[in-house]
Image: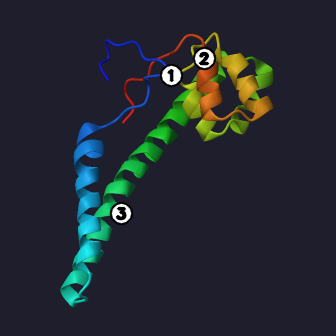
Amino acid sequence: MSEKMPQTYANHTKLVPMFHYVTLPLVLVNLVWSLYRVIPFSTQSLFALGAAFALAAIALFSRVNALKAQDRVIRLEERIRMQAVLPDDLKARINDVTTAQIVALRFAPDDELPDLVRQALDNNADQKTIKQAIKSWRPDYQRV
């Protein structure tokens, strides 16, 4: 997504073309092909299937682990921001906000944050609900 395009709930997700459109399809085609080639059974076909499965697992976990690491950084950044922005009654409850909720709250501007945190805590709101409740989107163009 271009940084010139305003970010909103409708367009905030990020696709990484080399991963989503090249690497992942090739890895999945390789895995399916290796499954197809396992019959007739041979040591070589079994080894190829194992290698294809390992390659698919590496591709999947590389993406998942990058997102989890980024979520940890977002959690830290947002907890620091919450300490500065939230009223005292909500500051005491910062640790009750889940990581998933914090990841969604990063899009909320400072003036909307207290009400959204209260809603997240009181209603156990999920990411989608929190993001849809944001009136003035605070973009995050750094997401991996």
Residue type at tag 2 = Ile
Q: Is residue 26 above or below residue 45?
A: above
3D distance between C-alphas at marks 3 and 1: 30 Å
> Is label 2 in contact with label 3 (beta carbons under 8 Å)?
no
**Disc 2 designates what residue?**
134
Question: In the rendered view of the protein, which quadrant contains the N terminus?
Answer: top left
Q: Position of residue 26 (x, y in %)?
A: 22, 55
> Is label 2 in contact with label 1 (beta carbons under 8 Å)?
yes
3D distance between C-alphas at marks 2 and 3: 36 Å
132 vs 88, left or right, is left
Q: Which mark is residue 9?
A: 1
- Mark 1 or mark 3, which is nearer the start of the sequence? 1
Camera-nearest residue between 59 and 41: 41
Residue type at tag 3 = Ala
Can residue 80 be seen here?
no
Q: Position of residue 69 (x, y in %)?
A: 44, 45
The residue sitting at 60% across, 33% down in the picture is: 127
Q: Residues within 10 Å of mark 2 (few under 14, many from 20)?
A: many
Q: Nearer the viewer, mark 3 or mark 1?
A: 1
Residue type at tag 1 = Tyr
Camera-nearest residue between 127 and 98: 127
Camera-nearest residue between 98 and 136: 136
The residue sitting at 30% across, 44% down in the picture is: 20
The residue sitting at 35% across, 53% down in the picture is: 62
**Disc 3 designates what residue?**
57
- Mark 3 or mark 2, which is nearer the start of the sequence? 3
Q: Which mark is residue 63?
A: none
- Mark 1 or mark 2, which is nearer the start of the sequence? 1
144 vs 86, left or right, is left
